[in-house]
Amino acid sequence: MTTRTWTSVGKTVAVVALLTFTLFPVYFMLSTALNGQNGSGTDSLVPSDFTLDNFSRAFTEDHFGRYMLNSAIVTVATVVVSGALAMLGAVAIARFRFRFRSTMLVLILIVQMLPAEALVIPLFLQMKDWRMLNSLLGLILVYIAFSLPFAIWNLQGFVAAVPRELEEAAYLDGCGWWRMFRSVLLPLVVPGLVATSAFSFVMAWEEFTFALTFLSKDDRLTVGVGLQRFFGAHVNDWGGLMAASTMVTIPVVVVFVLAQRRLGAGLVSGAVK
Amino acid sequence: MRESKTRPWLLLAGPLLVIAGLLLYPIVRVTTLSFQRYNLREVISGSPVFIGWDNYKQVFTGAPGLPGSYLWRTILPNTVVFAALAVILTIVLGTLVALLLQSVGPRVRALVIGAALIAWALPAVTGTYVWVWIFDPDNGVALHFLQSIGILGQEGHNWFTDRYSFYAIALLNVVHHSYPFVAITIFAGLLTVPTELHEAAKIDGASAWRRFWSITVPLMRPVFAVVTILSTIWDFKVFAQIYLMPGGDGSNPEVFNLGVWSYVSSINQTKYGLGSAIAVLLTVVLLLITLVYLRLLFREEDTA
């Protein structure tokens, strides 16, 4: 009896400690964002002056609305184009046996690990030559490329899981390949597309390195770099920064909760088939 | 089944074009740059100068303004030791959380998974700002807490100037952000371990500790291998988490890691050749880790 009590006490302590460590930064971000007076961290711990002023200030004085819009444009374009391209690539790899197929697979796994810090130097010089710094299109192109290898790798596991018999049934019914792709394969791979899009979404929404390097004009910034504008020369606007951080975090949490069940699926199972 | 020889290549044409133009060509260019002098003067004149291994010599034996042992004493410990500690802490915490998830009721489990998802979703950039705010040397909550219980005096303390406390905070940040993925993945793996094995071992009198090492670990080896190697790759190239901490953006060379050093040298100081050499070094290290990962994946494939 006593051992069992001690075990359950131990478990409770572990759960409480874990939840504190996990949620404290999130709580502290929210409580600072909602507090009118953030003279010191202790003031922000429990909001005494409950207000939404920090949010409205972030949007009116600090152009944060503009940054959110820029990030939304970049993210949607990246998710759509990289999802479409990844779908084509995933079907090629999962459904066809061709020469260099395993070479393709290894290539995709290798380019996936390339660090942004190595790519940013040549891409910065390239974009400068093309006069595409401060252009959202330039950033979108880079994000599509950056998210593509993982998207293909993740999606091809889902494509491979669709039974071939369904495809063959479509052919017997007289469908051409393209018709079969649209009416059979595509609808069945939607869950995989959701998971893949979630990863591309998060990458493009919060990307920092390329945005920091490519964007310098105030009206072109995305949220990842726009947050830096809250650091003044003398005083840091912690309330505004945390309000803006909250706005950056909310879409990601929504996407994670929606895609939750599928996030790990492609990564662990069916990685190489 | 009708298979044409051209169709896979038609499908791959778009993706391959993007990968070749925006990932492979830049890697070739950064390698070329690493053998050139390409500073502001060369950028303006448009003609880089080939200088052989000079940039690499600077990386290994000291660039102007930096001590000769900079790579060995500062950069490599900040990169390798940090990554090793972050990976170990992430895997240990992730495993403990997965085991905890297995032993609690469904409600607590949903609560813990929900909290972990939120920590996972907290963007690296905003998460870093929150940790910087917590440890702010002027008004931070950590400072006030330590002063109120008497550990710190009125003079306060700036954790960001000292390399070890700087990286201790970075470690908190990175582990907080990356343990949820590991915990959720390992928990999913634990569900596949047959309960009969544990029950049989229990009857034979094996302790929980013994059962973990003799049953869970061997069966879960592939899952542990995948999360360990992915974490290693991610923790080797942490950038925003360092760059956004005070001093990490270039003012305090004591706290750079490989990625930050490469970025500051090239983009901030316009020494593109030197920065490229550092970037190539980082890429080669990551490539070696990836090759281990690939061998592992394909070996699992063969035995499966």
Image: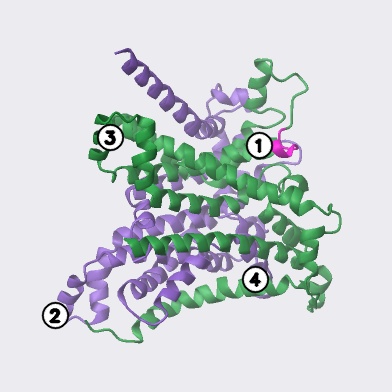
Of badges 2 and 1, nearer the viewer stands 2
Res. A111 visible in picture: yes
Of badges 3 and 4, nearer the viewer stands 3
Label 2 sits on residue? A172
Q: Residue furthest right?
A: B65
Q: Residues within 10 Å of mark 4 (few under 14, many from 20)?
A: some
Host chain of mark 1: A
Residue A237 is marked as 1
Magenta-highlighted residues: B159-164
Label 4 sits on residue? A127
| B161 in magenta | yes
The green chain is B
The three-letter code of the residue at mark 4 reads Met
Task: Provide the secondary structure element on which disc 1 rests.
Answer: loop
B250 relative to B282 in the view: left or right: right
Of badges 1 and 4, nearer the viewer stands 4
The three-letter code of the residue at mark 2 reads Leu
Q: Residue furthest bottom?
A: B5
Residue A226 is marked as none
Are the residues flagged by discs 3 and 4 from a single subunit? no
Q: Residues within 10 Å of mark 2 (few under 14, many from 20)?
A: few
Label 3 sits on residue? B201
B265 relative to A36 in the view: left or right: right
- Contact (Cβ within 8 Å) of mark 3 with mark 4: no
